[in-house]
Amino acid sequence: MKKDFPFQEIDPDGPRVAVRFDGAVYDLPEGANLAAALLVAGVRAFRATPISGAPRAPFCMMGACYDCLVRIDGVVRQACMTRVQAGMEIERAPAREVPHG
Amino acid sequence: MGDVDFLIIGAGPAGMAAAAQAARLGMSTAILDEQPAPGGQIYRGVEVAGPVRGRILGKDFLNGVQLAQGVRHAGIRYIPGATVWKAEAGGSVAYSVEGAARTIRGRRLLLATGALERPVPLPGWTLPGVMTVGAAQILLKQSGVVPRRAVIAGSGPLLYLVAAQMVRAGRPPLALVETPERRDLLRALRHLGGALRGWRYMAKGVGWFAELARAGVPRYRSATELRIEGTDKAEALSFVAGGRNRCIACETVLLHEGVVPNTQASRAMNLPHHWDAGQRCFVPDHDVWGQTAEPRVYVAGDGAGIGGAQAAEQAGCLAALHAAAALGHIGNDERDRRGARHLRRLAREMAARPFLEAAYPPGMQTRAPADDTIVCRCEEVTAGDIRRHAALGCRGPNQAKAFGRAGMGPCQGRYCGLTVTGLLAAQTGQTPAETGYYRIRPPLKPITVAELAALEPDPGENT
Ligand SMILES: Cc1cc2nc3c(=O)[nH]c(=O)nc-3n(C[C@H](O)[C@H](O)[C@H](O)COP(=O)(O)OP(=O)(O)OC[C@H]3O[C@@H](n4cnc5c(N)ncnc54)[C@H](O)[C@@H]3O)c2cc1C
Ligand code: FES
């Protein structure tokens, strides 16, 4: 694994499974927190804002800010509240699918 | 059917202690939490953190092991992964597990939903690569993940704890950029008596400072004019300290200015709240047992006012005792006798708070953000927008929604509410209490139509 990304695992162990994010295949720890696993894999932008299209990435890691929204197998969900499962098809949450006032 | 005597939302120290106490008193008890495992914020992932993480996180963290085991008790229905999106004063609660909505009812209901980190509206705080200090700590606790080149900025004890944990994880922060001013500390000295009674907190702080000094982590005090540099991701933190402009290149910026009660559920129930001037936040009204204006509804832990993990445990026990007496499981004498011990401990835990609140206030820059700083992350509304709303006659946060959508995104004001209250109060000359807060309506978290359609009552096995 490449090690020059901003986030690193201190005690990597356990089996890895393949998921797809925006077309690329990533081997992520099975059952791990999806937001954490994507950060370690070097993903920097998780979604775009509905107003200006600005990139966003996990901010709170506790399900409160919604900046980690991604579309998983067609459903927009919070990556920080989701566990890695084999075969997930993940995309950046498109701006128009982020709920807003 | 799905009814229980005591229904708890939140499996942090407050909810876990309350559940164990309630089950011991013979109440049928259920506890819901949206996280996959018990622990809450302080003890997040405590059941899975192996020895490596345990050493990094420290002894306080490992205190949570026993509490977490407590909810795995036969008399307690622990429902993990349950996101509560509606709670009613009558005790009915609607939640979703894996996209399926359910309902459950408690004869008494405890809101133990904990704290959120205070919003830290600074230029650039929406860029990828900027997260809260608490978020970095969650990454460490839950996933064993640490940022490689991070600067930590802001105010509050959590800054030093997490910096020390990063040192132990072998990835010390590049620097600590601290916003409290010298006069904050001088003001805090008035509360030194309380601080000495809460000496354990102070001793811990001294330990963290020593760890950071040994690791050679640079500390910049009384920092002002913080700005996260970068266009599509964080690349540096610039600031002014000691009369000099500084800029520290980094990949990650971790921000923190203390924690405030998560009042989404109590707000959505329309419970009365008051402004706590010391903690600079709104708190749901409650008595010493945690009972709110709705007699069947209790609040405990940081969601009822910031007190920390030990205080949260005591408050959880108090709420369980009161509910048990109300439902006839114990007499009022027994409630009062047992309650006295928890009240004494609670008072001891709260003793250091006034000192901490005065020494580590949110910085001036985030209390009165510059006009071009985004305050509502979801709808990208700036401080200048809010000031313009005020000039046009907007007097409260609910009106601000109509003026320009602040607080209307998916986070429902969690990361702008207090900022908008503060900005409007400053412009209109009203107090924060008069200015008020967003009206919160269920669902507390966005849910899909499919989830609603599939709504089924809680199966309620053995209750
Ligand atoms: C990110 C963060 C990190 C912290 N780290 C520390 C630390 O290291 N040391 C320390 O002393 N203090 C820490 N604190 C302070 C912390 O608030 C207290 O120490 C303590 O955890 C409070 O306990 P509690 O039981 O009141 O709430 P919490 O521990 O916050 O527990 C509340 C629980 O409620 C759940 N919840 C909230 N809303 C819902 C909902 N709608 N549906 C379902 N479940 C819900 C949450 O998932 C959470 O598990 C931290 C606070 C935060 C926000
Ligand atoms: S990172 Fe904030 S909701 Fe996921």
Image: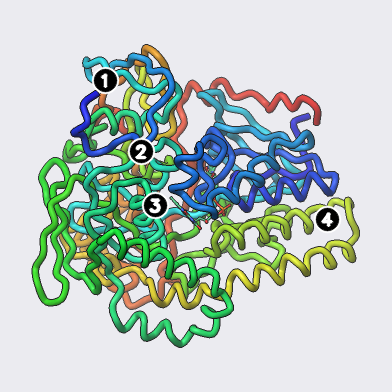
- Colour scheme employed for the rendering of this structure: rainbow
Which x, y percent locates residue A37?
Answer: 34, 29
Residue at image mark 2: B145
Apparent side of residue B352 relative to residue B154 in the rendered image (left or right): right
Mark pair 2, 1: CA separation: 20 Å
In the rendered structure, find residue A21 and report the number of the disc placed on it.
1
Which x, y percent locates residue B90?
Answer: 70, 46
Apparent side of residue B251 relative to residue B145 in the rendered image (left or right): left
Which residue is farthest front? B214
Letter of the chain that mark 2 sits on in the rendering: B
Mark pair 1, 3: CA separation: 31 Å
Apparent side of residue A54 relative to residue B357 in the rendered image (left or right): left
Letter of the chain that mark 4 sits on in the rendering: B
Q: Quadrant of the C terminus of chain B?
A: top right
Q: Mark 1 vs mark 4: same chain? A: no
Q: Quadrant of the N terminus of chain B?
A: top right
Label 3 CA crowd tier, 10 Å (few <14, some 14–19, many 20+): many
Mark pair 3, 4: CA separation: 43 Å
* Amino acid bearing label 3: Gln
Residue at image mark 3: B165
Q: So how many labels did they put on this image? A: 4
Image quadrant where residue A77 sits: top left
Residue at image mark 4: B326
